[in-house]
Structure formats: C-alpha cells, structure tokens
Amino acid sequence: MDDDRAVDTVASALLASVSLLVRRVRRVPVGGGLTMPERTALAHLDRLGPTTSSTLAREAQITAQAMGATLAGLRSRGLVARRRDPADGRRAVLSLTDAGLRALRDKRDERAELVARALERGTFTPAELARLAAAAPLLERLAENI
C-alpha cells in the first residue's frame, strides 16, 4: 500500500513540475514566426512522417477545420507539401518540406537556449545539473509509456 502512495505522490509531483516547465517555456515568445498550432502541426509531421490532415487533427486534439486552416498557412509559406496518397488517390498526404524542418528545428533550438540560460544562472549546483541530466531520459521513457 505504501508503494502505491509513493507512486501516486511521484506521479503528481512530476505532472505538476513538468506542466509548469512547459507552460513557462511556451509563454516566453521566441522568434521564427510559428504560432503554437503551426509548431504543433510541424512537430507531429516530424514525428509521424507523411500523414493526412485528419490524423494531424486527431493527434493535436483540434477540429479538422482548425487543422486545415493551420496547414493552409504552412503550405502557403512552403513549410508543408501536399501530394496524393499513393495508396488512395482520393486522399492527400502532407509532409514537412526542408524549410518546414528548418523552421521547426530553429524553434526547438530557441526554446532549448531559453532553458539553457535558466540553467546557467547559477541557481543549480553541478550535482543538481547532473541529476537533471540523468532525469531527462527517464522523463522521455515515461512519456513514451503514456
């Protein structure tokens, strides 16, 4: 029973702290000209590979219409390409262009720099930095198991 409470306590603490970190990082504006929905669509295309608009909408938990508008803007800027699905010519498949991948990487790099600056401010000891580094792969594995 104590193990169950310990797991619940760890789960609550992790969710609260990671959520706060993500909210703070997202709140700080960075360059690149990508809105949050655009960044989300590009990130899903990067992770999933070529896919349909409806799949992207499901992944992002938004309406198909909202995803369609987001993708139209990305296509007009050359960040996303659209082609017929070879398996079903009635459907369109979307994919990242080289420019889209660069825009996504630039946005990720800027956010990583933001976190790096926060880590460099001297509020973390070398031992704490090592613990954070060790926790990163564990957090990734936790996310993959959800």
Image (spheres, helix red, strand yellow):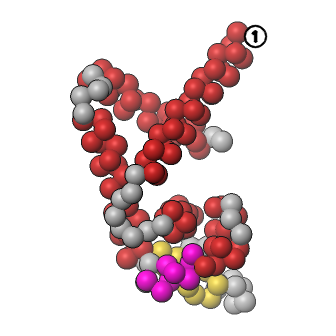
Measuring from the top left, give residue 26's x and y in whole percent: 46, 51
Measuring from the top left, give residue 124's x and y in whole percent: 30, 26
- Quarter of the rendering occupied by the N terminus: top right
Principal secondary structure, stretch drawn in magenta: helix
Q: Does the magenta stretch include residue 73?
A: yes
Taking the image as shown, residue 102 lies to the left or right of residue 120, namely right
Q: Which amino acid does label 1 sit on?
A: Met
Q: Find disc 1 in the rendering and name its residue.
A: 1
- Where does the magenta region start and end? 70-77
Residue at the outermost right position: 1
Q: Residue at x 31, y 38 (%)?
A: 118
Whether residue 113 is situated above or below residue 127 in the rendered picture: below
- Quarter of the rendering occupied by the C terminus: top right
Whether residue 29 is situated above or below residue 53 in the rendered picture: above
Q: Which residue is drawn at 70% across and 9% down?
A: 2
Q: Which corner quadrant of the image does residue 66 belong to?
A: bottom right
Measuring from the top left, give residue 130's x and y in whole percent: 32, 26
